[in-house]
Amino acid sequence: MFAKLRLVPKKKYWDYFILVARFLLAFTFIKYGYSKLVDGQFGVSSNDLLVPLKDLPLFKVMWFLFDHEPLKTAVGILQIITGILLLFESTAILGVVFFIPIAANIILMDISFMDEGMGRAFARRFAYYFVLCFLILWNDKERIKIIWNTMIKKFSMKRKFPILLYLLLPLFAILLEILPGIPYALYYYITNPERISESFKLIQSLFQ
């Protein structure tokens, strides 16, 4: 068996290491994601609920808040999807792109709400995971170069519109913001016509 291993090219050892790294990250996130879906993560005990909020450790407050839906299920599903993407070489880059921001949020929450010792331990653990992410990307650097070059080639400082239109961006952004509310406002005033005069009076009072 060991004699056969010596015949394996060194490049294959590196590829296998990357496969192990992807599997570790995938397993970690799939495990965490699944535990959220089956109530294995987040939440506090009934005894903790009887303790005044100011007396609870911040970590337990965080776990109580994160136990609410749809947050818990959404995070769990995202972690499982990320893990599945990492398992396959063709989607590993996308898996890393998903993994890094989710893991960064986990670190920030752990540092902020855990006690100092536990927070540092989790920070070191996820820092190691970030190194593995970098190595996964480095292993696929040719595809990364293609993606990067495609983005850079499409980037241009040349103006596509007159300066006036750029100056009017805040105005059009406000109009775009209120656009979805127009149908609701029309429906409201059609079904409640008596409110129209009240609204006009309110608008007049704002300009007096």
Image (cartoon, helix red, strand yellow):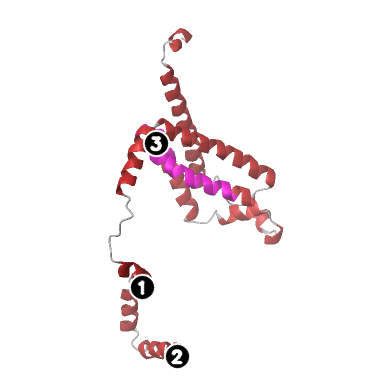
Mark sitting earlier along the chain (2/1): 1
Residue underneath mark 2: 205
SS class, disc 2: helix
> Residue 203's quadrant in the figure?
bottom left
**Marks 2 & 3, CB-CB < 8 Å contact:** no
Which amino acid type is shown beneath numbered disc 3?
Answer: Ala
Mark 2 to mark 3 CA distance (whole Å): 59 Å
Is residue 102 among the parts visible in the rendering? Answer: yes
Q: Residues within 10 Å of mark 1 (few under 14, many from 20)?
A: few
The residue closer to the viewer here, 131 or 121, is: 131
Q: Which residue: 66% across, 43% down?
A: 118
Q: Which residues are magenta?
A: 83-109
Q: Which residue: 53% across, 46% down?
A: 104
Q: Residues within 10 Å of mark 2 (few under 14, many from 20)?
A: few
Is residue 38 among the parts visible in the rendering? Answer: no
Residue 189 lies in the magenta stretch:
no
Q: Along the horizontal axis of the image, is 86 left or right of 57? A: left
Residue underneath mark 3: 92
Mark 1 to mark 3 CA distance (whole Å): 41 Å
Residue 89 lies in the magenta stretch:
yes
SS class, disc 3: helix
Q: Along the horizontal axis of the image, is 25 left or right of 191? A: right
Does residue 186 sit above or below 26 in this rendering? below
